Amino acid sequence: MAKKIKSITGMNDILFDDMMYWHKLERVCHDVFARYGFSEIRTPLLEETGLFQRGIGEGSQVVQKEMYTFEDKGGDSVTLRPEGTASVVRAFVQHAMHAQESIRKLYYMGSMFRYERPQKGRLRQFHQIGAETLGVDSPLADAEVVIMMDRIWQELGLQNYELQINSIGTFDERQQYLQELKKYFEPHLSSLAEDDQKRFDSNTLRLLDSKDEKCIELAKGAPMILDHLTDQSRDEFETFKKMLNDAGVKFVVNPKIVRGLDYYEKTAFEFVSSALGSQSAFAGGGRYNRLVQELGGPEIPAVGFAMGCERVVMLMQDLPKGEQQLSGVFVAAMSETSFLAGRQLLQALRDGGLVAEMGYESKSLKAQMRRANKLGCQFVVILGDDEVQNKTASLKDFSDGSQTEVSQEQLVAEIKKRS
Ligand code: HAM
């Protein structure tokens, strides 16, 4: 037998059993984004390497260690996108979107690539859904994005998560703070892990969210950026918090949220869940007021977020079965003779706009019920010889356990009413 070929480490197939979660997640996001005035944008998977070097920052771990960068046949250095924001901003500038409208709200869904050490919830090809508001520098826009995210989790029925927020100040405010932070860590430099010693020079802020015990302990006494904000940044952070409170979005202020990409300033946030283990952040984002300019555009501020779909799907799968939404119809036939009538009824249900399924050969009712359950169907339409004769069907609704006799003519309307 020929040797089997497996998918590349950290790059997974998404199979049918999981697909219903992915579809639901995408559907809810398309819906919610539309309500908040975001339109979809699709950008290429491959970009010029310089986009991410300039956009995400040479000092970030992503650019230093995790990019899939290679030379194409023409000798140009290209990179599989490790995130979506830089590409969206590149497209925004390339198509001069600001010239047509002063505020642009864009969202995207798709694969991202980071050469990280794979573990639970951490992949080399993963998927993000994200959104960006370009053209407004206001805590109201920051809050709008975070509230929208929270509403998405609500529609998905997610539980046990926490929103952590911080303000990491403007670039100018941060320069002064970084001096202080360096002064604080410098005497302990030799006792830090090698990675943290490197961070000291390249990305000092990240010492605050180091995973190394020694550094975590030290970071507890480090000066806090929140104490180094100007009045304006502090006021903006207060407004942001008030907006969240007014919308009933719970949060905690975590001064250690610094984010891994270099483009952030002022508002930074992450949604975390302890159910995910060590890779606990399932979404994150913040304000980035310089990126458009850094990528050759005018001075245009922006804010946005991205969620890690694999991690959100893990949270959806963890929900108790009762919390998961049932949908669709399964047609079950009780006899050989009702089987063919069942296939006809199946066609009528599909033509009526319903998601409906049935087996391809006559099987026991028990086996058919098992399949309906596996598919997560809300309804089973049961058809026996009597029902075929009377042009009726028995409609079982799993959302309330009821079973009613319905005429075949009324079936589509009745199911739609109950869905
Ligand atoms: P990020 O925090 O690097 O931000 O990624 C966002 C989310 O993607 C993370 O919270 C995590 O759930 C998921 N994620 C990241 N890396 C992996 C991985 N290797 N495997 C699985 N999931 C992963 C960004 O990418 C920013 N572009 C977000 C943003 C948009 N900021 C402003 N606008």
Image (tube, helix red, strand yellow):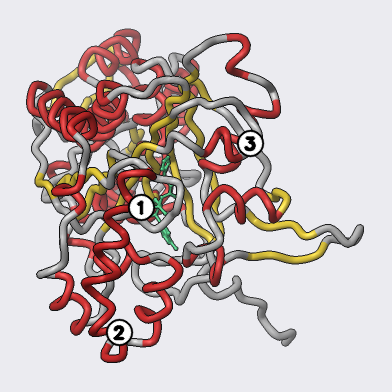
Residue plotted at (38% across, 45% down): 171
| Res 279 label | none
Q: CA distance from mark 1 to mark 3?
A: 27 Å
For label 3, the crowd category at 10 Å Cα-Cα, with few meaning under 14, some 14 to 19 and many 20 or more, is: many
Residue 101, image x and y in percent? Answer: 55, 10
Q: Position of residue 203 (x, y in %)?
A: 40, 65
Quarter of the image with the C terminus in it: top left
CB within 8 Å, label 1 to label 3:
no
Q: Please give the name of the residue rendered at 53% of the width and 55% of the height, measured from the top-left corner.
A: 57
List the single residue furthest toward the right: 74
Disc 3 residue: CB within 8 Å of ligand 1: no
Residue holding disc 1? 175
Q: Is residue 373 left or right of residue 69?
A: left
Amino acid type, label 3: Arg
Q: Residue 44 sits in which quadrant?
A: top right
Q: Nearer the viewer, residue 303 or 315?
A: 303
Residue 297, placed above or below residue 119: above
- Of labels 1 and 3, the one closer to you: 1
Q: Quadrant of the N terminus?
A: bottom right
Label 2 element class: helix
Task: Establish if 175 lies above or below 44.
Answer: below
Q: Is residue 137 above or below residue 193?
A: above
State the residue position of label 3: 90
Residue visible at 16% across and 61% down?
A: 223
Precedes in sequence: disc 2 or disc 3: 3
